Image (tube, grey):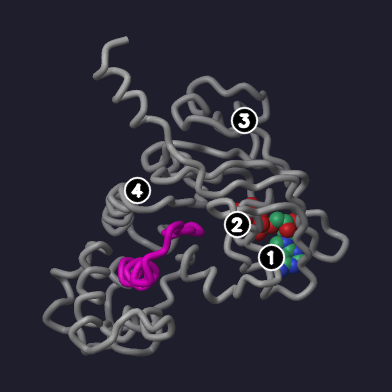
C-alpha cells in the first residue's frame, strides 16, 4: 500500500460519537425497545427505518434523554457520548440537549422573531458576551441552516410567518446555534412539499461535514439518498445495521429484505 492510499483509508475511518449498549425502553408494560446495541459514527448520517410502531422514535429520543419527559417511560442500558454516560446523575439534560440537538416532525418555531428563535439557545447557554457576538452566532447558524439569504432582510419578522420548508430550516438553524455535536431528526420532512424536502435533504448532506446526524424516516428513498449508515428496526429490535448501500441492495436478514421490498410495513 502506498502512502496516499494509507492516508485515504485513514480518512475513511470514522470515530464513534455515541455508543449504545444493551438498551431497553418500557412504557409501563410495553417493552418498546429490546436489547438494542448500536454505534453512531461522527460526521455521518445514520437513518433509522422500519414499520410504524417498531420503536424508531423511541430509540431516537433515548439519545438526548427526551424520554425523560414522557411519564411512564423507563430507559435501561448504556448510552455514551464521547465516552461519557449521558444518563449519569451529574448530567444536566438541558446541557445535554444543547450537545445533542433535535428537530421534530412538524416545524415548531417559537412565537418570536426569526432572530430570537435562533438566539434563544445561545442566550440560555451564555454563548455570546454582547450583541455583536450574538449577531455573529445567529448569522452563522442561519447560513448553516441554508436559510440566511431568504431571511437576512427580515430578522425581526416572526418565525411563524415563514413557509413550512423555511420554518423547518429555521428550526434546524435554531438546533445548530448551540453548536451541537449530534443532531437528531424525527421525520423532518414529513410535513414538507417535495421542493422543501429536497432543500432539507441537501442541507442534511452539508451538515454531515460538521455533525453526526441521526434521522428517523418512513421514506426508504430518503434514507437511501441522505444516509451512509442505516438501522432497520422491527418490533422493538434492531434487526440489521450497516452501510446504507448494502442494506438496500444486499441485506443479511430476511425481515430487512421484506421491508425494503415492500412486503412488510
Ligand atoms: N408515550 C408513549 N406511551 C406509551 N406507549 C408508547 C409511547 N410512545 C410510543 N409508544 C409505543 O412504543 C412503541 C414504539 O413506538 P415509536 O413511536 O417509537 O415507534 P416508531 O417506529 O417511531 O413509529 P412511527 O413510525 O409510527 O412513528 C409502539 O408500540 C408505541 O405504541
| Mark 1 CB near ligand 1 (8 Å cut) | no
Q: Please tell me which of labels 2 and 4 falls first in the chain.
A: 2
Tally of numbered tags: 4
Q: Position of residue 159 (x, y in %)?
A: 30, 82
* Residue carrying label 4: 208
174 is higher (above) or lower (below) than 1: below
Q: Nearer the viewer, residue 90 or 47?
A: 90
Tell which quarter ligand 1 is in: bottom right
Specify the segment rendered in magenta. 168-188
Q: Please tell me whether mark 2 sits on a helix, a strand or a loop.
A: strand
The tag on residue 88 is: 1
Q: Residues within 10 Å of mark 4 (few under 14, many from 20)?
A: many
**2 and 1 marks in contact (CB < 8 Å):** yes
Q: Residues within 10 Å of mark 1 (few under 14, many from 20)?
A: few
- Looking at the image, is mark 4 or mark 1 earlier in the sequence? 1
> Within 10 Å of the Cα at label 3, are there few (<14), some (14-19), or many (20+) other Cα atoms?
many
Q: Secondary structure at mark 4?
A: loop
Q: Mark 1 falls on what kind of element?
A: loop
- Residue found 54% across the figure and 68% down from its top: 96
Q: Say left or right for 98 vs 56.
A: left
Q: Residue at x 77, y 46 (%)?
A: 34
Q: Is mark 4 within 8 Å of ligand 1?
A: no
223 or 144, which is in the foreground? 144
Q: Where is mark 2, residue-wise?
A: 84
Do the residues under discs 3 and 1 have CB atoms within 8 angstroms?
A: no
Between the C-alphas of marks 3 and 2, the distance is: 32 Å
Residue 200 belongs to the span the image colors magenta: no
- Image quadrant containing the N terminus: top left
Amino acid at each position: 500500500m502506498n502512502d496516499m492510499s494509507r492516508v485515504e483509508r485513514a480518512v475513511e475511518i470514522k470515530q464513534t460519537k455515541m455508543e449504545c449498549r444493551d438498551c431497553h425502553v418500557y412504557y409501563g408494560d410495553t417493552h418498546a425497545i429490546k436489547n438494542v446495541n448500536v454505534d453512531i459514527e461522527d460526521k455521518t448520517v445514520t437513518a433509522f427505518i422500519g414499520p410504524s410502531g417498531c420503536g424508531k422514535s423511541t430509540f431516537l429520543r433515548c439519545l438526548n434523554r427526551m424520554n425523560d419527559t414522557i411519564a411512564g417511560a423507563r430507559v435501561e442500558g448504556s448510552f455514551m457520548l464521547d465516552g461519557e454516560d449521558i444518563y449519569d446523575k451529574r448530567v444536566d439534560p438541558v446541557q445535554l440537549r444543547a450537545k445533542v440537538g433535535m428537530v421534530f416532525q412538524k416545524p415548531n418555531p417559537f412565537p418570536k422573531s426569526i432572530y430570537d428563535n435562533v438566539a434563544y439557545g445561545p442566550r440560555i447557554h451564555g454563548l455570546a458576551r454582547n450583541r455583536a457576538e450574538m449577531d455573529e452566532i445567529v448569522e452563522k447558524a442561519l447560513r448553516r441552516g441554508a436559510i440566511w439569504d431568504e431571511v437576512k432582510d427580515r430578522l425581526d419578522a416572526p418565525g411563524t410567518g415563514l413557509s413550512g420548508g423555511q420554518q423547518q430550516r429555521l428550526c434546524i438553524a435554531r438546533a445548530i446555534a448551540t453548536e451541537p455535536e449530534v443532531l437528531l431528526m424525527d421525520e423532518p420532512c414529513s410535513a414538507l412539499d417535495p421542493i422543501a424536502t429536497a432543500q432539507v435533504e441537501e442541507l442534511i448532506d452539508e451538515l454531515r461535514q460538521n455533525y453526526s446526524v441521526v434521522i428517523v424516516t418512513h421514506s426508504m428513498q430518503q434514507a437511501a439518498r441522505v444516509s451512509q449508515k442505516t438501522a432497520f428496526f422491527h418490533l422493538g429490535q434492531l434487526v440489521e445495521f450497516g452501510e446504507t448501500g448494502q442494506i438496500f441492495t444486499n441485506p443479511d436478514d430476511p425481515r430487512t429484505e421484506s421491508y425494503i421490498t415492500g412486503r412488510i410495513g
